[in-house]
Amino acid sequence: MKLHIKVFASLRQKYPDINDLNPLTIDIQKGTKIVDIIKLLDFTTDEVHLILLNGIKASIDTSIEENESILSLFPPIGGG
Amino acid sequence: MNKWLKIDLTTKEIKDFTIPEETLRKYLGGKGIAVYFLWKHAKKLEEKGIDLKELDALSPVNILIFATGPATGTKSPNSGRHHVMALKSPFTGSIGSGNTGGKWGAKLKFTGYDGVIITGKAEKPVYLSIIDGKAELHDAEKIWGKNSVETSEWLRNEHNQSKAGVSCIGPGGENLVPMAVIMNEEHRAAGRTGLGAVMGSKNFKAIIVEGNEKPKIAKPEEFEAKIKEHVEKLKENGVTGQGLPTYGTAVLVNIVNQSGLFPTNNWQKGVDADAEKISGETLTEKHLIGKNPCWGCVVACGRKTKVDSGKYKIDYTEGPEYESIWALGATTGINDMGAVIKANDNCDIYGIDPISTGSTIAAAMELYEKGKIPDEDIKGLDLKFGNADTVVELSRMTAFREGLGYWIGEGSKKLCEHYGAPDLSMQVKGLEMPAYDPRGAKGIGLSYATANIGGCHVTGYTIAAEILGDVDRFTTEGKASLTITFQDFTCVVNSAVNCLFLTFALGLDEYVEIIGPVTGWDVTAEELLKTGERITNLERMIINKFGITGKDDTLPKRLLEEKMPEGPSEGQTVDLETMKQEYYKLRGWVDGIPTAEKIKELGLD
């Protein structure tokens, strides 16, 4: 099934062309854990601080069950 | 150091005074001590038989306070800020309050003063200089009409003080635009509740400050040791050490949008399909030319920016911040970062609140979309969502009260009432809410609803827990205590006075390590949080005198009744009443009014 990946802020240093308007789409097995995607992208789990799966907070242990899911990865960020 | 300045612009009397130490300990400084002064002033006006509900915020009896606190101007990080308050806001009718970055706060401290209270009204425009401890009023005829950048340059040249801090109003304040701001260092604003109009109503243009007096530290060795630890913590923290320095506050655009609570087209949606184009990443890649940290700041979220070409070309400006990008961008349907930068620059130099400006333009756009504003009222402006030229032009017209700009300056509440659709105004207590839709984070809804000044995010920033932290954003459970903790701790920060962004890395224990050694007081975290609670309650007691109670602690109907139409927060509304009743119970309030027992407990009786 398809997974659309978006990376933000300093995570774009590794993937400068991947963003909200241009996600990276890959094929994955149903039930793949987010930690495996993070490893696949060559990030460490420390680098990825906030994870959204279809806009909802998720953890590295969350399994991806739905086709066409969107995975958004962020480093530590804040502001206001 | 305990020296305050009081200036009566009517009589031109200038006098110094000190505050009893027990009062300082009770209110700390900054916002806390300003609220205490406002309370005393309110009581005095009542004794004179003045009805505070009817008090005209632009009358000479309103007072304006510029305040620093024990942390300001010290070596503790990010301590260049100051807090400004007025008894009544001309924009909302609630209390006037704004906190600002820059260097002015530290520079004021270096003059030997902790704060300035302005009363009365000058017969002709004046400004104040406080240089090397000497306070003087001057004729301001030559700078009346100048914008914030021109005013600052003129004053620094006139006083031969190239690095002085300048706090001033632009045309917005002079023209008594109700949402006018007080600017300092050209691009920093005490931005909410129309403090600039209060200043303008007093014919008071600016305060220039410079000096060499360093704040006294009671326990310098202990202080130095703790400060080193704090700086290390800030540098090691991912938010203050990396996220904010690299991308500025605009780094929030994508996380808030991806979470589906980025208010778009006047809060009709929570996802902006083009948010990437106005994100912190885009700002950094295409417009950033440097950083401009506040005085003593180790984070440096302040952006120096430019627009290279096109009709919005600007060689140098600063910002925009996350909230301004949202207000002048997403909620008006704009995805052109150049236009957002230009409109934000207009707000800065002309001195109006970008959050209220953008949000009110968005309300006008929805009014137009729904056929509520006739074409003859907009005189050639294209009021459709997404028209960047209109937003840029209205950001100028508002400061000069031209055409539809008159109504934008009045704010969305009056605008929407005027055109017969009050529910399209996205405000609380008359103050436009900032860039987080509470349907996607329930705590911020309670925070907006109960904020004494109205729709404000920085009086209780629960987003840090709900979106950037681990707290469940959709539940209402626990949000009352979360909001109370954020509100009271923020009062401590704004009374210290230093930067709220410190709290991404430093907690109450570190504030004990700042306040204790500076003052010599044996404070505890519990005492500081109790001080914050006292300030929140006294501020609430003031607004109660204006007739503001539980009925005003609410949210726009759209957030309470209209389900979020799409995106990750789809189907959500805000169950405010449940959270609010729990909040009142925990606060010791009944219908938005502190009980006699609570007042006594806090020593406010």
Image (cartoon, coloured by chain):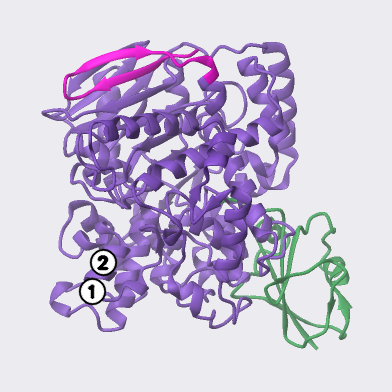
Chain colours: A green, B purple
B564 vs B517, left or right, is left
Instruction: Tell me if I can see residue B535 in this picture.
Output: yes
B13 magenta-colored: yes
User: Who is closer to the viewer here, B54 or B2?
Assistant: B54
Query: Residue B117 appears in which quarter of the rendering?
Result: top left
B368 vs B466, left or right, is left
Residue drawn 27% across the image and 78% down it: B368
Q: Chain of mark 1?
A: B
B254 magenta-colored: no
Q: Residue beneath label 1, please?
A: B419
User: Who is closer to the viewer here, B153 or B269?
Assistant: B269
Residue drawn 63% across the image and 77% down it: B568
Query: Residue B232 appears in which quarter of the rendering?
Result: top right
Query: How far across and down, in percent of the image, does residue B53 sit?
Result: 28, 48
Q: Can you say whether B5 is above or below B49 in the image?
A: above
* The disc label shown at residue B30, or none: none
Q: Residue beneath label 2, please?
A: B415
Query: How far across and down, in percent of the image, does residue B294 sit?
Result: 51, 34
Q: Residues within 10 Å of mark 2 (few under 14, many from 20)?
A: many
The kind of residue tagged 1 is Tyr
User: Who is closer to the viewer here, B105 or B317?
Assistant: B105
B284 vs B509, left or right, is left
Q: Can you say whether A79 is above or below B476 in the image?
A: above
**Element on which disc 2 rests:** helix
Q: Chain of mark 2?
A: B
Q: Residues within 10 Å of mark 1 (few under 14, many from 20)?
A: some
| Dots 2, 1 in contact, CB < 8 A | yes
Q: Which residues are magenta?
A: B1-22
Query: How far across and down, in percent of the image, does residue B158 sit?
Result: 24, 20
The kind of residue tagged 2 is Leu
B367 vs A62, left or right, is left
Marks 2, 1 in one chain: yes
